[in-house]
Image (cartoon, grey):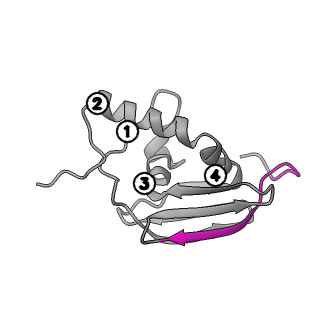
Amino acid sequence: MAGLTPETPWPTDIILHQESRQLEIKFDDNSQYQFPIEYLRVYSPSAEVIGHGPGQEILQTGKRLVTIHEIVPVGHYAIKIHFSDGHDTGIYSWDYLKRLGVYHEDNWADYLNRLEAAGASRDQEVH
């Protein structure tokens, strides 16, 4: 992971909105993003989600109602999010969160297309 640079966006505020299941992040460049928790979960930067190389991504399904239990700082460069489904291995750097915000619409459309292609759902299967 590259170190912090003067260009690295820095969060000035991180607010968890549990009822609307959104994580709001404001950056020092005056940008701000409302991240649906489901979006953060399905785009977790963990090997469990992105695999160990291009083409090894694992499609995340049934995450529509996931919530955040805890947000833990990781040094001065990231946060670790503990999700209600037990997932907690992704380390969300400030750069990564900024990219998730900038490309939210494209990423989300891609995710929905991949779900549809797989015949999968955002909802958990009930057994």
- Give neighbour class at mark 2: few <14, some 14-19, many 20+ (Cα, 10 Å): few
Dot 4 falls on a residue whose secondary structure is helix
Which residue has dot 3 on it? 38
Kind of residue sitting beneath label 3: Glu
Which contiguous range is marked in magenta?
4-17
Image point 77% across, 54% down: which residue?
9
Kind of residue sitting beneath label 2: Ala
Numbered badge on residue 97: 4
- Give neighbour class at mark 1: few <14, some 14-19, many 20+ (Cα, 10 Å): some
Q: Are marks 4 and 2 in contact (CB under 8 Å)?
A: no
Which residue has dot 2 on it? 118
Kind of residue sitting beneath label 4: Leu
In the image: residue 76, left or right of residue 71: right
Q: CA distance from mark 4 to mark 3?
A: 14 Å
- Res 66 visible: yes
Which residue has dot 1 on it? 59
Q: Nearer the viewer, mark 1 or mark 4?
A: 4
- Give neighbour class at mark 3: few <14, some 14-19, many 20+ (Cα, 10 Å): many
